[in-house]
Amino acid sequence: MDYFDRMARDSHEAVHFFRDAATGYRCILAVHDTTLGPATGGTRFCSYESEVAALEDALLLSRAMTRKAAVAGLDFGGGKAVILGPDPSAGAGGQEPALDPDNRESLFRVHGRAVESLAGAFLTGPDIGVGPEDLRAMATETAYVAGATDDSPDLAELTSLGVFQSIRIAVEHAFGSYDLSDVTVAVQGVGAVGQALCELLVAACPRVVASDVDSARLARVAEQLGMEVVGPDAIYEVEADVFAPCAGGGVLDVTTVNRLRAAVVCGAANNQLADERLAHRLRRRGVLYAPDFVVNAGALIGGTGELEGWSSEEIERRVRAIGDTLQRVLETARQLDVTTLDAAVRLASARVRAAG
Ligand code: NAD
């Protein structure tokens, strides 16, 4: 890979590589754009097929964070940290000690020091594979981490609230009614966000169908909430009005888009489209795609709100306003006759340009 060309393609400002021999910590921290303010973005901890795949994830996720903050009206830029999980094929090249996934406290303290070394140029919080204990370990080394105290807002809950508000708006655009009382939703992934979203949905919709690769977790959540379940691959073909991806990224490719039965895609997962050109295919098929970085800004709003000292009422007000932002995106798409993704990117870019 030609690294500087790749950075230039999406105008990334910086990529930091951190390592620690004692813990086997390897982290790629991408800063996309700081025109609006310091870069903010979660820390992800997972295994990758290769170091290049990890870099690509950090680059795409940090770009999404710039767009997310800009569209949400926040004065922050976009960044993302990915810590490479234990994967022998990930290319440590035999130079590094194996990462010990059970020694999480040391690992995340090292990560906290890495974040601290950037002196506030990057603010972080949780993402896939990073839990409250990890955040607390980081917070012993840096002040630039959200979600680390008992008083911290529940970021997954805030994300689910923003997605729920967005589902209402998207349903209104697609079917002409804000009411969810005859709407079926298929939820992919009942992790932290998916479960919280399902709790909101079962209270508002007659039918919620869920999938998860963790079948024990799925069974537990489904029983608790009274939901139908399907296998991981069957979720795309559920006769639903809304498909809510709340698992990993890249789940919508040519094949899955063609299999979709739902008329609305609105969920929490970051980078849902395997290729952004799929926004056109979704539109041609009459599927309303609610851009992920617009609807899943709840955690970003909660995390930055915590670091900025906003009250919980102010944070909730701003998260509920995600529905208004989506409304603006959908109206812009209609007026300009462009995809919803295109409309959202235009709104984000216009805000960054105006500040630059
Ligand atoms: P999580 O790790 O708690 O939950 C993800 C769930 O998806 C797990 O239960 C996992 O078993 C399941 N899963 C994985 N692959 C699957 C598949 N192919 N089919 C069905 N289920 C699958 O993560 P989370 O915090 O709930 O985040 C979910 C998504 O939302 C991620 O893409 C994350 O980046 C994004 N997101 C999360 C937040 C947040 O506040 N946590 C904020 C913005 C975006």
Image (tube, helix red, strand yellow):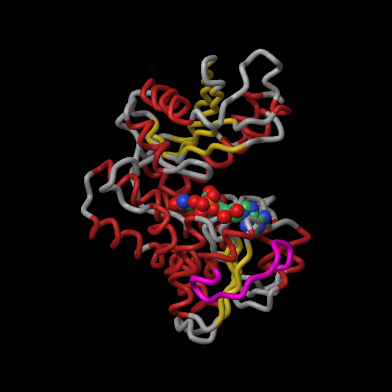
Which residue occupies the foreground of this view, 135 or 164?
135
| Left or right: 40 in relation to 245 | left
Vertical relation: 332 (above or below) 128: below
Instruction: Give x and y (percent) for residue 135.
Output: 39, 37
Vertical relation: 239 (above or below) 268: below
Q: Is residue 135 magenta?
A: no
Boundaries of the magenta span: 222-234
Instruction: Give x and y (percent) for residue 291.
Output: 54, 59
The residue at 28%/46% (across/down) is: 150
Q: Classify residue 243 by image quadrant.
A: bottom right
Which residue occupies the foreground of this view, 86 or 318?
86
Instruction: Give x and y (percent) for residue 193.
Output: 48, 58
Quadrant of the rendering where the N terminus is positioned: top right
The residue at 56%/80% (across/down) is: 207
The residue at 43%/78% (across/down) is: 203
Quadrant of the rendering where the C terminus is positioned: top left
Instruction: Give x and y (percent) for residue 239.
Output: 68, 78
Q: Can you see residue 236?
A: yes
Q: Is residue 233 magenta?
A: yes
Q: Classify residue 49 by image quadrant.
A: top right
The residue at 59%/25% (across/down) is: 99
Q: Can you see residue 345?
A: no
Q: Classify residue 26 by image quadrant.
A: top right
